[in-house]
Amino acid sequence: MSIQETGTARPAGRPRSEKAEKAIIEATLDLIAEGMGVSELTIEAIASRAGVGKTTIYRRWSNKEDLVVDALATLKAPLPPLAGASVRDDLISLVDAMRQESGGARTRCVMNIALNEADRHPQLMERFLKRSVEPRRQAMRAVIERGVASGELRADLDLDMGMAMITGTMMWHSKWAPAGDLPPDLAERVVDAVLRGMAP
Amino acid sequence: MSIQETGTARPAGRPRSEKAEKAIIEATLDLIAEGMGVSELTIEAIASRAGVGKTTIYRRWSNKEDLVVDALATLKAPLPPLAGASVRDDLISLVDAMRQESGGARTRCVMNIALNEADRHPQLMERFLKRSVEPRRQAMRAVIERGVASGELRADLDLDMGMAMITGTMMWHSKWAPAGDLPPDLAERVVDAVLRGMAP
DNA sequence: GGTTTACGAAACGAGACCGTTGCGTATCGG
DNA sequence: CCGATACGCAACGGTCTCGTTTCGTAAACC
């Protein structure tokens, strides 16, 4: 009987190490998380940190950019479960998720790239925005729209402006907060401050 | 009569070209404005763009960082005149100044550095924040405080949160606005949206 | 065992910048 | 004119990263 399973011909020889692949991507994310810009990323540094030969990297990705795209693609956007009890509660859930993540190195790396190199690597950004940012945008938009429909929020509310206020305020805090760690009640305070202008 | 004026001995020989100095700083700002990170800035590129020998640069600055500090220091923060008629009008003046500047390459360069390399060059940031950001912060804070005192704004207003909302919302727009150029009425809309939650 | 492919390590030549130096010229004061 | 200094330019040796190649070994198949 041949080796074929489900029509996929297994190539001869030693198979590629899945462990090495994972180590490479982890090393890439680690380096970015440590404040390394995409332009300063070195293949050699990645290989060294991953405990891998450069050959192993070049065998899989031809560009540094391709590698970064794949690395960022592994970052999921796990949305918090929304209770749906009230607009305020749901927004606090979403915003507090931002707050918690803003402390994590992985998220910082993503923020850095998103803010710094948006215009230098537009296609990278496009893929990343679609995968990681858009789901959150949609979730927040849905919450606000539901609030408008239920009467919890003003009927003539400017959706985009409201989302800009929430997201922008959190962005501002996570970038320029005094201590680096954001206070636990920040989400609540931000949402309440913004909602005060959104109430009917 | 000696050449001395006000006790400053004029050193012998050809004086340093003020034009060259200006060209160097302009070139530095231009390169940064084009999306070049501080780490990617090359002395050679600056010299080439400024039409200047590397020697002329090294004669004046020993570090790349020193040069960047001096270059950023030339960026003034011309605050718009505030009519003082109402909190709304003054805030719109301040925010609209942000909007207009956000289109300029110079301001973009500053934003990029401020956002990207805050933790990599902390002392650079310190000097820059003190010179360029703090005056604006103070101006906005004064306007809001005056509004609270005059009863235009809620007495229990959270000053810092209010400023974070305004600044963050504008930051968000200038970074992620769809078209790059911000609509002329953006300042008005942002201020009105935020003020709605600040009214007594 | 034999073949085939992947692996980590090391070395390579090419190119970019570094900070410095030497050179001929330009511009100041005396 | 003379001495002093700055200028633009070109070249230097040194370091770093690049992407590639070679090497001996490891892991899968026949």
Image (tube, coloured by chain):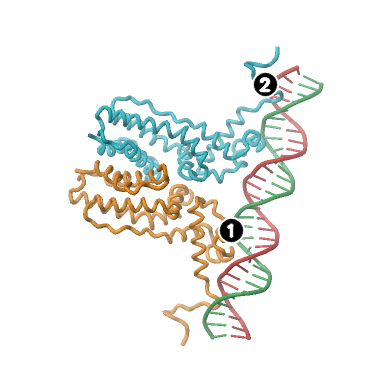
Chain colours: A cyan, B orange, C green, D red
The residue shown at (59%, 43%) is: A42
> Which quarter of the figure has residue B76?
bottom left
* Residue on which the image places disc 1: B44
Q: Which amino acid does label 2 sit on?
A: Arg
- Please state the horizontal and vertical placement of residue A160, each as a whole percent of the image: 34, 38
Estimate the spatial distance between the alpha carbons at disc 2 and disc 1, rounded to whole Å: 52 Å
> Looking at the picture, does residue B13 appear above or below residue A139?
below
> Looking at the picture, does residue C11 appear above or below residue D7?
above
The circle drawn on residue A10 is: 2
Q: Mark 1 lies on which chain?
A: B
Is residue A178 visible in the rendered image? The answer is no
Callout 1 secondary element: helix
Callouts 2 and 1 close, C-beta under 8 Å:
no
Q: Is residue A172 left or right of residue B85?
A: right
Farthest residue in the top direction? A1
Callout 2 secondary element: loop
The residue shown at (22%, 50%) is: B147
Q: Which chain carries label 2?
A: A
- Please state the horizontal and vertical placement of residue A117, each as a whole percent of the image: 49, 44
Q: Which amino acid does label 1 sit on?
A: Glu
Please name whichever residue, B111 or A124, is drawn nearer the observer in this view of the structure.
Answer: A124
- Please state the horizontal and vertical placement of residue B168, each as a whole percent of the image: 35, 44
